[in-house]
Amino acid sequence: MAFLNMEQQTWAFTFGILGNIISLMVFLSPLPTFYRVYRKKATEGFQSTPYVVTLFSCMLWIFYALLKSGAELLVTINGVGCVIETVYITMYLVYAPRAARVLTAKMLLGLNVGVFGLVALVTMVLSKGSLRVHVLGWVCVSVALSVFAAPLSIMRQVIRTKSVEFMPFSLSFFLVLSAVIWFAYGALKKDVFVAFPNVLGFVFGVAQMALYMAYRNKKPAAAVVLVEEVKLPEHAKEVAAAAAAAAPEGRASCGAEVHPIDILPAEEPPVVAAVAVAARDDPQQVAVAIDVEPVTCAAAAAAAGGVDGLVAAELATMKPDTAIAVEV
């Protein structure tokens, strides 16, 4: 602190206090997300990775601030961050599916216990004095960059789904503001380990805000099921037409009326009126036209190559010269 004049110390302290306040807003910005998780008792499409990595980063910054003199403001905000992130992760573990819980537990053990313990051991045993601070400082920079890059997966999801549901604007806004404040604090304190990573944090924050503005009014992409109507070959039309003419008058097709098999009179055997298989040269596409009695729908479908009987029943209401292409 001797190399800083009084004015620099005052400004550094001011920006440090502002940084604590803004960073607290960043830590609290996912509250609506976790309120939704609590209300729905499900994590839906949310991921735990950003919170696990943020907890790891807070632990490292506390360790760094304890080794470096004059960094008390880093201890306060990162201590609060550890508490908040722990609450988030606990809620995630409670409401996430089993596979997500297992993955989160593995990340916690591997990163927050294994890697942190290794960093602490290497820092305390293999380095001394100012070298120890520099080694830990560069480790903190690397982790801070990964924290700022963690939302990349969310940004990719926004682009793919055209929905900003899982990327709240408040988080991006406070991320940008926090990066500006902490960069100023690091510059005034002449601490490159604090100032440098916040440059990337500013860039990613602005990118997220731009993405939010671009997709905020977009409708989420939905899966579209396409049903293709194709012409049956001539021989299939002839078979279907002949069977329709031979059918007893006044009888409903299987698409119009459904009866249990066991209540049909034993003396009235089912008659398959027509089963036509189109596109025989392409085994991946089967077209079926059926005008049959209800009891024979499943059997006719089986004869057509394994198409489900219920699907065949629906196909029975089609025109005799058309069918639906079914991928099998």
Image (cartoon, rainbow, N blue to C red):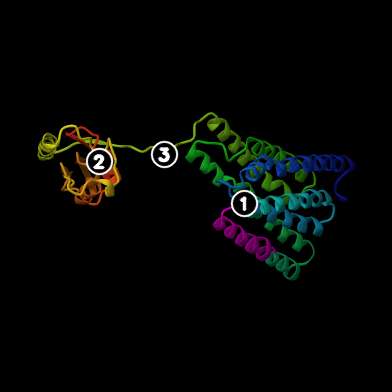
Q: Residue at x 27, y 46 (%)?
A: 263
Instruction: Magenta stretch: give its range.
Output: 96-116
Q: Is residue 251 left or right of residue 155?
A: left
Q: Position of residue 266 (x, y in %)?
A: 20, 49
Q: Which mark is residue 223?
A: 3
Q: Is residue 130 left or right of residue 43?
A: right
Query: Which type of secondary structure does the marked residue at label 1 adopt?
Result: helix
Q: Position of residue 132 (x, y in %)?
A: 75, 63
- In the rendered image, the vertical position of residue 249 relative to residue 144, given as above or below: above
**Is residue 244 visible from the viewing direction of this image?**
yes
Q: Main secondary structure of the magenta part?
A: helix
Q: Residue at x 27, y 41 (%)?
A: 313
**Which quadrant of the structure image shows residue 223?**
top left
- In the rendered image, the vertical position of residue 322 relative to residue 268, given as above or below: above
Q: Residues within 10 Å of mark 3 (few under 14, many from 20)?
A: few
The three-letter amino acid code for the residue at tag 1 is Tyr
Q: Is residue 97 a member of the stretch shown in magenta?
A: yes
The three-letter amino acid code for the residue at tag 2 is Ala
Query: Which type of secondary structure does the marked residue at label 2 adopt?
Result: strand
> Real-space Cα distance between discs 2 and 3?
19 Å
Q: Position of residue 217 (x, y in %)?
A: 53, 28
Which one is earlier in the sequence, the residue at label 1 or at label 2? 1
> Real-space Cα distance between discs 3 and 1?
26 Å
On the image, numbered disc 1 is attached to which residue? 95
